[in-house]
Amino acid sequence: MRKIAKFLAASAVVIPVSIGMGVGSANAWADQTCANGKVCLFQSSVWNGTKYSNNYAATYVGDAANDPTSNIVGYTTNPAYRYVMFYEHLNFGGNSFYMKEGQAISYLADIAYPGGGNWDNRISSHDEAY
Amino acid sequence: MARYPLSLLVLVVALAGCSANSQPGGVDAASLPSVDRAAYAGVHAKLDPATAIISLPMDAYEATPDESMVITAANMYVIEDCMKNADVTMPEKHGDLTVKADQSYGVWVPELAAKYGYDKPIIRIVSGIYDSQTRESADANVKKYFECDNATVSSQIPPFRSRIAGEDSLLTNISNDSNALSERDPEWRESRDDWITCLKHAGISMRQDSPDAWVPSYPSDKQGEIRTAVQDANCKQETKVMQRISDIRAQYQSALIAANQAAMNRLADDKTEALAKARTILRQHGKGAV
């Protein structure tokens, strides 16, 4: 597991993005933030497109936010729940993966789906996780 | 509520080993290992209706809720030490952990369905260990918290958890592969079809917008939801679908664990060692009784 920690440390990159600056082809006016205690989903890559924001737990992200392409997990005040579990189906069902508070994925296609494929256009619900 | 620019957050980039498919959202079984679970037919998952917990072989290598609380608390102190060195107060951090029913494949305990419908009930509470003693989270403090979290990763106790986004680990590979193999197993489909047929006979249909989900269509009012949930759980019992699909998962997990036994043994040793280190950190901060 030490190898995993080192791998994470080496692979995690803090990106210089802030409101108004944008990155790559990102919309310069997009709200690319996520408030404390919230999960944010975006319909386009690099945190663009329609934004969804909700508490760590949601049985269904709703038709408008369903199957996002990028996401962010905001800070949590409860250390017991440093992770959010993202699920393939509503009501916390099907395949799933974790993200830690403060993590942001610019393109969910970069996250492998069990057995092949990826997580782009797959998230339907999310829950706080230990 | 405070909001933070993305510069405060950590990006998980495309990672070697993630094997992102060239067909977005597509499914390609070519990357799955060839596994014959017949040799593990004697392995069974343990389903406990009283706690709504499903126990599988991989659980031994992942942190339990209680272990996770110890690990997280230790890591909070590691981050707090970094914050103190920077003369910045930790933002608000405190709280218990509520352990909820395992409903990855929907409701399956009739008694819980009758009480909570499709909501995930809380089974027990693990008391919190760490408390920052502050009750506000100013932007600057949260910003420093994330900086310290990143800066101290190598000193923190690993979470011993599979399927963390961006983490390429044996735990994740076995978890993902066993799930994918299970879902492709003919007996998995047969078990699921038996459950769906039972629901159909009871007048319950699958959701049109999510036909692969493990929750059927149910009325929007709570009483209607509970009626459907109870019938759903009864169908799960009648068809034994939960035991059947959980056994399939358990058998694929066992086969994959055996194929990587030496590495898994090292992982188990690492976990024991890491928990001892976490408890040492807690003792150093006056939390000796956990």
Image: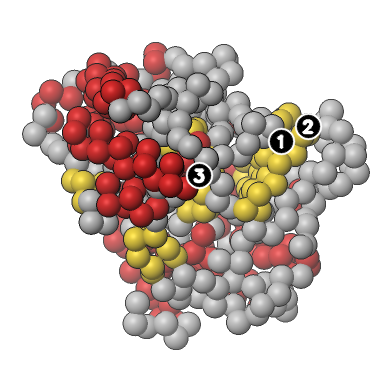
Residue nearer the viewer, B260 or A130:
A130
Q: Amino acid at mark 2?
A: Gly
Label 2 neighbour load within 10 Å: few <14, some 14-19, many 20+: some
Identify the mark at residue B221; answer none if there is no mark.
3
Give the mark, 2 or 1, whose residue is nearer the N terminus. Answer: 1
Query: Residue A127 at what x, y percent from top left?
Result: 51, 49
Does dot 1 land on a helix, a strand or a loop?
Answer: strand
Q: Nearer the viewer, mark 3 or mark 2?
A: 3
Location of mark 2 (residue):
A49
Residue drawn at the location 36% of the way across and 42% of the way down:
B227
Q: In the image, residue B261 lies at what x, y percent?
A: 22, 39
| Residue type at tag 1 | Phe
Asked if disc 2 and disc 1 are in contact, CB closer than 8 Å, the reply is yes
Q: Nearer the viewer, residue B203 or B101?
A: B203
Residue A42 got which mark?
1
Q: Is residue A99 visible?
A: no
User: Residues at marks 1 and 3, common chain?
Assistant: no
Say how many tags the image has: 3
State the quadrant of the N terminus of chain B: bottom right
The answer to whether residue B88 is seen in the rendering is yes
Question: What element does badge 3 sit on?
Answer: loop
Lateral position of residue B23 relative to residue B87, left or right: left
